[in-house]
């Protein structure tokens, strides 16, 4: 069994940042990653200072190279099982052990059951205006089912339509807000999106009506990819907005420590709303916390080793002293009883 100081499960922005911090701290680190980042369909990463617009794959490739440059190991695959003693089984059947584990497995976007959304996800079916709003600014944009998101997206486009999609009608106050911001509202269920020449051109209603739009913002349910942690009994919780659950996430304290000893978590598995730069920052911070934990453990081991060595020397001194005085610590054969 190969042993590491730290096993990092997941090699996105959070996982690689944690591994980078730990590698620079001269820890032996293994990153296990399936190579399927959540943001792979996007053209670029945004709001990442000095890296704005960088394709996701390019950013991760640079991160992997940096981690390897500090001695970190990266293997492609998944962790299929994680035990409370911090031994892990990988998808290739091998087993590794670690003194600490950092889980950065991210989340899964559960999209509304509407034809075509998954195929256009991250391209012109979007969820975060801070991530994608600038790229569709000034175009014909739609928002699915959320008055709050419609008011937010209005910052980027005045040609905005809110599709109620069979949900509850806006409140009187919300109607006033939508009207004041010039946001049109379409009732009825949405059945799909219309695509021409690999571009979204409209939103189709259940009655066949097509409303011309070039981008559509939706609100997925964000489900943390924390099966390894929940199997260990790590606490999870729902993130609630406006009285409605919008995500699940792993519960961790400010240092990233979970309820299972030796296990930390960072990135979207803990914070479903984190962007790439936020997740990277969280990973670096958790990496530092894990190293501090290991430093204390190293120190405790050194103290115990020093005390044990001192005790051994003391015993040796006593034995040698007794021998010099003709004494023996073991009974002689003649002194035994029958």
Image: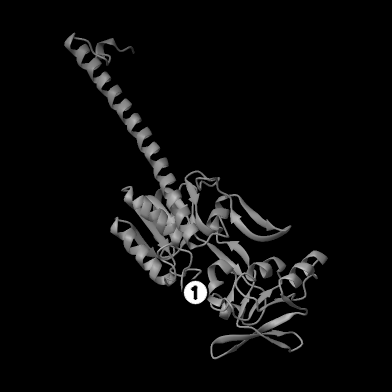
Note whether residue 10 is visible.
Answer: no
Question: Residue 89, located in which quarter of the rendered image?
Answer: bottom left
Front residue of this view, candidates 172 and 122: 172
**Residue name at image x 53 percent, y 57 percent:** 228
On the image, the x and y values in percent for residue 249 come to 59, 56
| Label 1 residue SS | loop
Q: Is residue 309 left or right of residue 282?
A: left
- Answer left or right for 105 relative to 153: left
Q: Position of residue 45 (x, y in %)?
A: 46, 69
The image quarter containing residue 194 is bottom right
Q: Residue at x 63, y 81 (%)?
A: 140
Residue 122 vertical position relative to residue 94 in the rendered view, above or below: below
Q: Is residue 268 left or right of residue 146?
A: left
Name the residue: 69% across, 65% down: 148
Display coloring: one colour
Percent coordinates x, y for residue 305 in the rendering: 32, 31
Q: Nearer the viewer, residue 206 or 184?
A: 184
């Amino acid at each position: 069994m190969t042993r590491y100081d730290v096993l990092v499960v997941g090699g996105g922005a959070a996982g690689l940042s944690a591994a980078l911090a730990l590698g620079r701290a001269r820890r032996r680190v293994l990153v296990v990653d399936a190579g399927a980042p959540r943001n792979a369909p996007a053209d670029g990463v945004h709001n990442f200072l000095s890296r704005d617009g960088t394709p996701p794959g390019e950013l991760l490739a640079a991160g992997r190279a940096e981690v390897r440059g500090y001695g970190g190991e990266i293997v492609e695959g998944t962790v299929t099982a994680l035990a409370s003693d911090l031994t892990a089984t990988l998808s290739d059947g091998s087993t590794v052990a670690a003194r600490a584990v950092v889980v950065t497995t991210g989340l899964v976007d559960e999209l509304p059951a509407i034809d075509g959304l998954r195929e256009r996800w991250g391209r012109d079916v979007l969820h975060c205006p801070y991530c994608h709003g600038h790229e569709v600014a000034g175009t014909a944009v739609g928002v699915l089912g959320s008055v709050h998101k419609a008011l937010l997206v209005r910052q980027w486009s005045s040609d905005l339509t809110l599709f109620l999609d069979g949900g509850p009608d806006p409140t009187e106050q919300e109607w006033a807000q939508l009207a004041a911001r010039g946001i049109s509202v379409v009732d009825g269920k949405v059945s799909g999106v219309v695509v021409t020449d690999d571009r979204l051109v409209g939103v189709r209603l259940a009655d066949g009506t097509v409303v011309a739009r070039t981008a559509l913002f939706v609100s997925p349910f964000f489900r943390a990819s924390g099966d390894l942690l929940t199997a260990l009994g790590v606490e999870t919780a729902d993130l609630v907005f406006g009285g409605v659950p919008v995500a699940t996430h792993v519960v961790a304290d400010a240092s990233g420590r979970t309820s299972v000893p030796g296990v930390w978590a960072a990135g979207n598995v803990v914070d479903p709303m984190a962007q790439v730069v936020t997740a990277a920052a969280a990973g670096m911070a958790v990496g530092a916390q894990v190293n501090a934990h290991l430093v204390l453990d190293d120190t405790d081991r050194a103290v115990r080793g020093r005390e044990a060595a001192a005790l051994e020397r003391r015993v040796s001194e006593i034995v040698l002293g007794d021998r010099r005085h003709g004494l023996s610590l073991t009974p002689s054969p003649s002194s035994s009883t029958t």
